Structures are given as structure tokens and as C-alpha cells.
Amino acid sequence: MNSDQINKEYIDMIKSDEKRYIKDYEKTMEKVKGSKAIYKGRTMPTLYHPMFLTRKDVRELEKIGKSMMDISNKLTDRFIEDKEFRKKFHFSKFIEELIEVENGYDINIPIARYDLFFKDGENFKFCELNTDGSSAMNEDYIFSNIMLESLALEDFSKDKKLSSFELFNSWVRESITIYNKTKNPKERPNVAIVDFKESATDMEFLEFQESYKEEGYNCIIADPRDLKYRDGALYHEDYRIDIVYRRMVSYEIIDKKEEIKEFLDAYRDRAFVCIGSMRSQVVHNKIFFKILHDQDTLEYLTQEERDFVKRHIPYTGIFGGSEEVFKKVVEGREKYIMKPMDLNASQGVYVGRDFSDEEWEKRLRDSFDKDYIYQEYFDPFEKDFLLKTEDGFKSESFKTTIGLYIYNEKVKGFYSRIGQESIISGVVRYFTLPNIFVE
């Protein structure tokens, strides 16, 4: 049975006895409201309906993740080795120097969330690559656990085995595996989860902190402005830091570099192991998709990798320079989505088909030569999900996107969002769904 058939079976089960499930729906949503699935002060939205994934889905997504990671590594290595290739990225000298710092272990991207539109192993298109402060594990963890306790999944599991994907202790183990590849690792290193206080996802950080402690490691949560570099080591008060799990994103490091001089000096001197070094910025910046389609980049890849890029990476261009580029994008309102090169959480993203011709041109004028990319808009694959209405449960079609959590180059779990607008993110109405593995 494939995931679409499983999804339909779930809808049919709920619709066949709505009264039975409405009470449990209300109980489940109360649990959600009282949970720690909180981002910037608000509870994240979800449904009484998981994203069901089969073993076939997981294997296909693992294969996709590996293919994209192989390409990511190949081009990150080229960035380090080839100063001409490096110029394509238009990074500042400050960022280039941080990227050049050796991370001390043998991989470029310790943690990532690769987001894509996915139907099956042949039909998918990447949306973006998050390799810088990858987040939202807490939402999947909480929603999956709550949903697995529901009457709906209790009934649904009578002839199936249902389970969730573990994203916290698995990260702890993989991060320590990475650390142990460095020179002279300690048996019990001190860990710090580091982000700017104003940007931190507190509930998620607390879960990671608890997981490090469960695995036998000291762990603190710290603002980089509070860290001191002395005697060849990085400290928070008297706590000597061996591992930084970096959650602060690169654009904030750039904006606040004058406030974190001691942290940056310690980073340059390799006074600690940074898991999530600045090397991951090569792939994270949205110009990466543009560079993937450049002819000289394609020539650097294998034929299989070239085909992968052409089929599954949306065509992307820099929105600046000549008036010819501006005209092309103005006339392609139905074809393009606009994205800032280095912001997260869909900040500044807008889609041509959401505007009139006049509004589109005005928005484009404001974005031209302002570090924006234009990108081929891809219509996400759709699937039916149940919404609770005043009249009971109603099945509606939603656009879907799935993120692959990749720890130490292994897919460990997923992040699913659905919506009915052109963008599926926190800037518009959307839902985060628990991911449930069905056997």
C-alpha cells in the first residue's frame, strides 16, 4: 500500500464515524495548545491528520538527500580550492575568511534541512537548502507524540505499525561522532548551543540540552555576546566550551560581528569545535541554485548529477544588473518567485501570480539590485487532508512540502508543511504536520 492509499484510508476512517473522532480532535488540539510547540511566542498550527510515510517513501527521500549532499560537498570543496569559482558567490571578505577556517572534521555540512516538493522518487523539485541554523525539529517531535496518543491513530494502528522519527538524541550521537573525528577529542566534552537571544527557539534548545544531558554531556544554552576567549579557550563564565552547536545564522553573524569579537577570534583560532561551521554557508545562500545551473558548474559534475540538477533544481538567476533581466522577470509574472539571497523563514519572499501586473512591477522595482534572486515557480504537489469545520471534518486539497533532516550526512527525519497559498510557510496560513512512519 502506498502513502496516497494510506492517506485515503485514514480520511475514510475519520469520515465514517465523525462523532467518535470529534471529541478526540478537541482533546488533541487542547494538548497542542498546552504543548511546547512554540515559536516566537505562538503555538504552531497543526491538523488532526499526519503526513504518512512508507518505507518506500523513506528510501526514495534518503536517495534524494544523498544525491543532493554529494553535489553540495563537491561544490563546497571546489569553493575552498578554486578562488575563481569562489567569485561567483559574491561573498564578503569577512565571510570568505570564516568559510576558509578548517572545521577539524571530515564533512562540510554536519546538519541540514533540505526542503523539497515531493511526490515520489522521480517527481520532486527542491525548494531550498537550509544548512545554517536548521530548525523546527521540536514541532515534529511534539506533534508526532501527541498524534500517536490520539484515538484516531490508536484505531488506525490496529492493522499497521505506526511510529515517529527521533530527532534529538540522534543529533546528539551524530554530533559527538563528528567531534570524535577531530584532533585530541575529550571523552566528555562540554557543549554549548549558541544563538542570539532574540532569535533563539527556546523550547527546541531546551529539548536539545536535555538530550545532551541524557547522553551524559554537560550542555548550556548561550548567547555569543556572553562568551569570552581567554587562555586559548572559549568560556561562558567558568564553563569551558569544547563543542559549539551553532544555531546562529550567518546573516546575523554579519550584522552583529562587532558584538561577538571574542567568539569570532576563538572560531578563527579553532579554540573549540564548531559543529555547523561557516563552511555550510556555501550551500545555504540561495545563489547556490543559480550557480548550479551555470554551464561551467554543470561541466564539473557527472552526467548523472547534471541530469539531477536540470530536472530537480529550479532555474534561478540573480535579479540585478541589466535592464534586460528586469524586463524578463516583469514579463514572466506567472513564472517566477522572488527570494532574498540570505534570509530565512520565507522573509521577503513573494510570488508573481499573487499580484497584478502593476503591483508585480512595483515590487520588482523595490527588489532590483537588492540581493534578490528570481526563481522558476514550481506548483507544489497536492494531497487531501482533513480540516475540522463547524459541520464536522472536511477533506480539502493542500500543497505540500517536506524537509529532510540530515545529520552527519544521514537522513534522520522529516518536516512537513501544507498550505493553500502560493507560499507554504509562516508568512501565510499553513500547517505543520507530524510525520508518521507506516509499516
Image: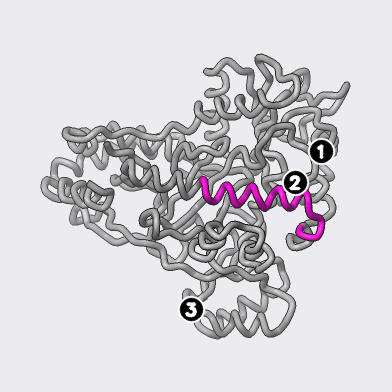
On the picture, is 18 further left or further right than 48? left
Q: Are marks 2 and 3 in contact (CB under 8 Å)?
A: no
Q: Which residues are magenta?
A: 66-85
Disc 3 element = loop
Q: Are marks 2 and 1 in contact (CB under 8 Å)?
A: yes
* The disc label shown at residue 253, or none: 2
Q: Sequence order check: which comes first, mark 2 or mark 1? A: 2
Q: Is residue 360 above or below residue 59?
A: below
Q: Is residue 247 magenta?
A: no
Q: Dot 2 surroundings within 10 Å: few (below 14), some, or many (20 or more)?
A: some
Q: Tell me, yes or no, if residue 437 can be seen here.
A: yes
* The disc label shown at residue 334, or none: 3
Q: Residue at x 71, y 69 (%)?
A: 370
Q: Dot 1 surroundings within 10 Å: few (below 14), some, or many (20 or more)?
A: some
> Residue 334 appears at what percent x and percent y?
48, 78
Q: Residue at x 75, y 24 (%)?
A: 183
Q: Which residue is mark 1?
A: 264
The quadrant of the rendering that contains the C terminus is top left
> Residue 326 appears at what percent x and percent y?
65, 81
Disc 1 element = helix
Q: Dot 3 surroundings within 10 Å: few (below 14), some, or many (20 or more)?
A: some
